[in-house]
Image (tube, rainbow, N blue to C red):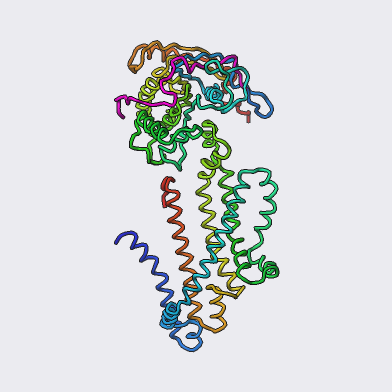
Amino acid sequence: MSSILPSGRGTPSGARDVATGGVRIERLSKQYRLNDTPFTVLDDIDLSIRPGEFVSIVGPSGCGKSTLLRLIVGLDTDYDGEIRLDGVRVAGTGLERGLVFQDHRLFPWMTVARNIEVALLTQKLPRARRERLIASHLELVGLTGFENAYPHQLSGGMAQRAAIARALVNAPKVLALDEPLGALDALTRVKVQAELQRIWMEAGTTMIMVTHDVDEALFLGDRVVVMSARPGRIARIVDVDLPHPRDRASPVLHRLKDEILAELTTEPAGDTLVPFPAKPRAPR
Amino acid sequence: MTPRIRALALGCILPAILLILWESQARRGGAHAYAFAPLGVIARSFAAMLGDGSLLRQAGASLQRALSALLIGGGTGIFVGTALGIWRPFERAATPLINTLRQVPILGWLPLIALWFGNGDGAKLLLVSLAALYPTVLNTQKGLSGADRNLLEVGALYGFSRWQALRRIAWPNALPLLFTGISQALAFAWIATIGVELLFSASAGLGTEMMAAQVAARTDILIICIACVGAMGFAMNQGFAVLRRRALRWQPARPQ
């Protein structure tokens, strides 16, 4: 993986206005109906994300963190409250909001280059410009030379970087990342985290990343949102006041990690705890 | 010895044993020589049929019939299967009828079609097309309705229209099953071609030739025709498999 920053990256919008990409979430609640009983996934979420910020979200399973991302990108539009991007209420999906899934979701029948092109298909761009954008984004994620490879020929880390290139190629103002590195092995994961930090610093896109890994959340995030489950609420927001690029060995990160882990593990579990054995054994 | 040659040699053992048994029967003389034409006689007839072009003519007629029917029946099947796969009301309305009709063997349609259209080329083409129809309908439908929801979500994310989602996601996603459908249709069409030629013995074709050979008690010609039908079916199957591999080269290699 090259550590040399590629330069001259072209985006459809050219040089981005630094003031765009702010997300405001107000009084957001989301309910599912499970066998006719309403089930609250997200409860009264308020969160303001600055343009260009990197926000990590951590929390136990079932705290609705992935659902929150789906609401932001508009794959799910059934909720109460408001989500605004630069002051405008979001409605449905839109190219200004991107999403990277946990599984890369590349189309297996397309090469890497054609997969990245998928994100550009609804824009009327001249072919030469499209190809330039694809090439520059392949360079951005370090996949130059793999444009004609099919997804099954890539390693997990490479496929996920291709997915990141696809998500960035139409220059979204906000990029949501749903456990983007969750399927990678530990070593690859650390490498791609550094890549992601570099890409974020270069692209200047606002990024909101859901993860299970507190180290990852702290290494990348300007802020870490800690959520609690049932119903999904924001328990705490941790500021990570360290400049990027960061040093993993920083004592600040270690101290914050201990705090967040304490928050996540001492959370009152109450009725969610199942006594063991579940039932006292019936007397013979 | 490369594995390829080894496999080829292995595949030749059983046919060789069959030929030896055949020839030993033929040499027992009398009725045996009549039922089992000696290999020498078969070879001479084969050379004669190749020489006067009759074998090529008959085989060509059968091949043309099977492939035109594949085009007509398969094309219709892909169209109907697509409609079934993407349009729920149509699927609900048509499925009971289709599931009933496909229980009728192709030969079951033969008397009715003969009554309506006679026993000419049109009637044969219709029957063989019907044989190619069902597998393509079913596999196209299955492929489209089983489109990967996760990939469709990617389309939604990038603002795909319904048409774009069909053309760029659902269709390519259904391609492996579509190829399965076409390869089944090819096999069914070939079987049906020989079948209708045997039963509607008019105009050219290997089946017609076989009926004529039976009447003339020419075991040698029968054997040549049977071998021809088998070899051509095998060759078409292999050719299609190559086509399939090329079209689906994006699929991860599966253990053979």
Q: Looking at the rendering, which quadrant does residue A70 occupy?
A: top right
Q: Nearer the viewer, residue B18 or A158?
A: A158
Q: Residue furthest bottom?
A: B30
Q: Give the magenta part as a residue range.
A: A1-30
**Residue B66 appears at what percent x and percent y?**
54, 64
Q: Is residue A40 rendered to the left or right of residue B17?
A: right
Up-down relation of residue B164 to residue A101 (above or below): below
Quarter of the figure that contains the N terminus of chain A: top left
Q: Nearer the viewer, residue A60 or B166?
A: B166
Q: Nearer the viewer, residue A184 or B120?
A: B120
Membership of A22 in magenta stretch: yes
Q: Residue at x 53, y 42 (%)?
A: B167
**Residue A53 appears at what percent x and percent y?**
44, 16
Quarter of the figure that contains the C terminus of chain A: top right
Up-down relation of residue B94 to residue A85 (above or below): below
Q: Is residue B85 rendered to the left or right of residue B234?
A: right
Q: Nearer the viewer, residue A30 or A60?
A: A30
Q: Residue at x 63, y 47 (%)?
A: B84
Q: Disc count in the image?
A: 0
Q: Residue furthest front?
A: A126
**Residue B24 appears at what percent x and percent y?**
43, 81
Membership of B125 in magenta stretch: no
Q: Residue at x 59, y 61 (%)?
A: B129
Q: Looking at the rendering, which quadrant does residue A171 occupy?
A: top left
Up-down relation of residue A51 to residue B11 (above or below): above
**Residue A279 appears at what percent x and percent y?**
61, 26
For the stretch drawn in magenta, what is the main secondary structure?
A: loop
